[in-house]
Image (cartoon, coloured by chain):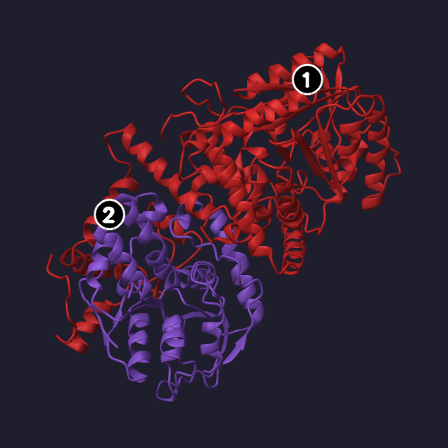
Chain colours: A purple, B red
Amino acid sequence: MRIALFVTCLADGLYPDVGRATVRVLERLGHTVEFPEAQSCCGQMHVNTGYQKQAVPLVERFADVFAGYDAVVAPSGSCVGSVRHQHAMLARRFGSRDLQQQVDVVAAKTYELSELLVDVLGVTDVGAYFPHTVTYHPTCHSLRLLRVGDKPTRLLRAVEGLELVELPDADQCCGFGGTFALKNADTSTAMLADKMRHVLDTGAEVCSAGDSSCLMHIGGGLSRIRAGARTLHLAQILASTREDAA
Amino acid sequence: MSAVMLGMPGAPPTSPRGTGHLRGDESFPAAARHSLADTQLRSNLGHATRTIRGKRAAVVAELPDWEELREAGRQLKVHTMAHLPDYLVQLEEAVTARGGVVHWARDAAEANRIVVDLVRATGSDEVVKVKSMATQEIALNEALEDAGIAAFETDLAELIVQLGNDRPSHILVPAIHRNRAEIREIFLREMGDVDPGLSDDPAALANAARLHLRRKFLSARVAVSGANFAVAETGTLAVVESEGNGRMCLTLPETLITVMGVEKLVPRYADLEVFLQLLPRSSTGERMNPYTSMWTGVTPGDGPQEFHLVLLDNGRSAVLSDAEGRDALNCIRCSACLNVCPVYERAGGHAYGSVYPGPIGAILSPQLTGVEDNASLPYASSLCGACYDVCPVKINIPDILVHLRVEHTEAQAAASRVPTAEAAAMQAASLVMRSPRRWRLALRGGRLGRLLGRRRGVIGEVPLPVLKQWTDARDLSRPPTSTFRDWWAREHGDSGPTDGGGR
């Protein structure tokens, strides 16, 4: 199976460790991962901020770059949500018939990391070792756009040494919401405060999630108040092994 | 947006825009700043929304066919909207045949004028009111007061709001922002006939309101109501409420005036079966609604002998003409979306400016008024999708929010040849991201950000526009020394294919 990594623009530029970890997990499971370098962004930022037309060239690029693979994996529920739901809408509104067909084909084989591992590759124990207390924020788009359900936590429960503690009000948004965090900074901060309170209430050392954007928000808040808890992407935990711990 | 009239028959080709209490004095972020700082409000709202959320989730989980009910509700609404002019004419004929009088109101001013004239014609200078979003929307109480007519709200929460000289902040629970200690103070201060020893026990507060209102019910000659549903085939109106005050208003006075948005129609009497299951579970978290009053025209010797139905457009035809946004009209005002919304829970209803708060307000108000008059509302959401999940008629609120954002940015672009800073930034990002070469260079350039945050390894407060909005409350990760693609090129060399590259 030819698996392509869609690393996402955020991970490419700011969180390369998340991309590296995704590659590492899949390679450890015996798969070959390819990285088509012509990729950039899914276009979600443009769509959600009200600039749909500017997103169309990015949708075309995405469909073009990833057309030749059996599966596309991204370490982001939000970006995969955009690929599955927004690309078809944009292609229908602004694109050719060819593009409409192309985005449907590509979207159907684009997976968020936990979906690829559990649904496509049929794995829940990826052979990871992570001796820490972890709580999991399910992220809105993984939860409500992709319906990934308990796939991420099933993967985490299979990690050796990891103690998973339940996050209260886990399904509540952390307040990121892309440009929402800038346009409605005060409301966003109020939402973040409650999310951080819940994370700290669990006593976990690590708050994990399947989206670098939500983690950037939660982690940025925790860092600002020197909370003593950190954030790590699901991929980074799944990539950890005994050798790392030693 | 097309200006084709799809809603009210016989109206001019340009749809009227909504007037009345649909616009705030401040933008959402500015108004939210006040409410976010009100710790009492935050506590009241947090407690109340959490309670209703839990009740709703429990009773919805009891129904194995909940998703089928939602789909039935959605399809009924979509069908009704597609044939709205026909059903409205059918309703008018049915109501008229049963002895009612139908009036058509283009906007708030016209509706208020009709109601004031009808009340004056009865010779009465006071009316009792059933809780109604439509009359809040058109500011009827203010119009009646200007005409020397006293309006008495009889719903407990609406009474609290009226006595407190306040504004409603929730569709179902207008006084959700008040706790019982505050309510006791309002009653002691404003209710002339209250026992000075009144406690803040909910039962005692309800009883004080009961005694206060009973005199109004028995003396009032005119009542004004809204409507939850109107049945086109029979001309039947329905009001759904929890306290019995509505039943009193709808049955005791001689004259009943009902103000209803044109979108409240259902085609057939049997369709109510779907909505009377969806509504109580979604709104109050009850299995069945306590008081469901239905009436058809007038019945000699029983109930009001004069019945007027005022059909209100006030921007609804304009909403209906927008294929991407019209589903907002399918709303049955259950307020489940408010109770699950993390933005509503923290900012409160008043921050939305309009009488329609929360996620549904954020898509309805800008469409009723035109997005330019409520430009901040489509952005008052993190697009978390909780509202769409609970909506009993499956309105895709996040998609409509995004659609309205597009309308707003396109209106801005049309209004000025100079793009806004945001539009310029988005255009630049699009140009960079569509070219692999420019994107690679931009990613490398991002490392310049490492100049910031050398001391702590993260970027703290930065007094620059946009960045400041973020770093006021959150640190920012310091850009890494190497991007992912640089690492990939080093580790995997030329093994990675570059499909579609080189543009």
In which quarter of the view is residue B4 placed?
Answer: top left
In the rendered structure, find residue A95 and report the number of the disc placed on it: 2
Q: Residue at x 45, y 32 (%)?
A: B319
Pick the quarter of the image with the C terminus of chain B: bottom left
Q: Are marks 1 and 2 in contact (CB under 8 Å)?
A: no
Find disc 1 in the rendering and name its residue: B145
Q: Is residue B41 above or below residue A140?
A: above
Badge 1, how many Cα within 10 Å: few under 14, some, many 20+? Answer: some
Q: Is residue A18 visible?
A: yes
Q: Residue at x 31, y 53 (%)?
A: A87
The kind of residue on which mark 1 rests is Glu
Of the pair B493 and A232, the residue shown nearer to us: B493
Identify the chain of the residue marked 2, using the numbered disc in the image: A
Q: Position of residue B369 (x, y in %)?
A: 46, 28
Q: Is residue B207 above or below residue A107?
A: above
The answer to whether residue A196 is left or right of residue B417 is: right
